[in-house]
Image (cartoon, rainbow, N blue to C red):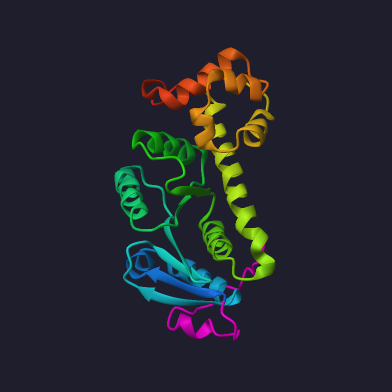
Amino acid sequence: MANFKPGNVDPVLENPSSKVTKSSVSAGVCMMNTTWRDQQHPSFINFICSFLAANSFRLNFVPISPDFIFNCGGLSVAFIFVTKWDRGNVETIFGRAKKLKAQFAHLYVTVNLPTRDHNDDFLCSYFKYEMQLGRPTFVPVQDIEMGFEKIVKIAHSCGGIDNHDANAVLVLPLALRASSVFLFWNKLKRLKSLHVHGWIPLQLNQTIGSIEGIAKASKECLVEATDLSADKAEVIVRFFRDSKFYLTPKFN
C-alpha cells in the first residue's frame, strides 16, 4: 500500500491547481463536483487541495454527477462523499447512490458517521431503502478528513498506478470487506437477543468473508463456521431476511 502524505493546510482556494504541480510525475487526476465544493467549509476544501498536492494529484473543478471522479492509471473511480449525515435527506442519498451505480462501474460512497446514533441510523436506513450489499460499496468514517484520505487511497489502489503497488489492489478490498463486517456487527451485537464474544466477527470475516455471504448463509452454516449457538445464529439469519425484525428497535 502506498504511503500518503498528510499535507499541510494552506489557503489554495484561489488557484488550487497551481499547487498540484510539484512533481513531474502525476499520480492521477481528481475531478471535484463544483456544487459539492460550494457546500463545504473553505477550510475543508483547503485540506483537500493540500492533500492532493502533497500526493501529486491534479485537481479540476467540474460540474459532474458524482462528488468526485479520480482517474488513476487509466481507470475512472467515482465517489459520493456524504460529509454530514442528515436523517431528513436519507432518501436523496440512497436514491443518488442507486442512480450512479448504474452509470459507473467503480462507485464508492463515503459517509461521515461521527457518533453511535449516526451509525445506527445509517444502518437502519440502509436496509429500509433496500440497498444491495456491496453495490455500491459504502465506506463509513468518523471524520471528514479521514473520509477524504480513504477516498484517495481507494482511487489509488483501484488504479494500480505502479507495479510495486499491485498488492494494494488486493489489500484494500480486503480491508473494506473486513471493516464492513465489523460495521454491521456493531449493529448486530446490540440486539437484546444476541450477546456474544468479541471474536465472533473475526470468525465470520475469516470463514465466510463478506456481508453478502453472511446474509445468504443458513443457520447451520453460521453454527458450523463460528462459536455461535443455534439460537443466536437464527437471530442473525432473521436480521438479514426478516424486514419486520431488523426494522423494529430492539437495542440495548
User: Which quadrant holds residue 69?
Assistant: bottom left
Question: Where is 167 relative to 182, above or below?
Answer: below
33 or 77: which is nearer to us?
77
| Residue 12 is covered by the magenta coloring | yes
Q: Residue at x 51, y 42 (%)?
A: 115
Q: Residue at x 42, y 71 (%)?
A: 31
Residue at far top of view: 231
Q: Position of residue 51 (x, y in %)?
A: 56, 71
Quadrant in which the N terminus appears = bottom right
Q: Residue at x 30, y 48 (%)?
A: 92
27 or 165: which is nearer to us?
165
- Drawn side of residue 91 relative to residue 173, left or right: left
Question: Where is 127 relative to 165, above or below?
Answer: above
Q: Position of residue 106 (x, y in %)?
A: 45, 57
Question: Where is 138 relative to 14, above or below?
Answer: above
Q: Does residue 163 show up?
A: yes
| Residue 55 is covered by the magenta coloring | no
User: Which quadrant holds residue 202?
Assistant: top right
Number of numbered labels in the structure image: 0
Magenta span: 1-26
Q: Does residue 192 show up?
A: no
Q: Position of residue 5 (x, y in %)?
A: 65, 70
Dominant secondary structure, magenta: loop
Q: Position of residue 158 (x, y in %)?
A: 54, 61
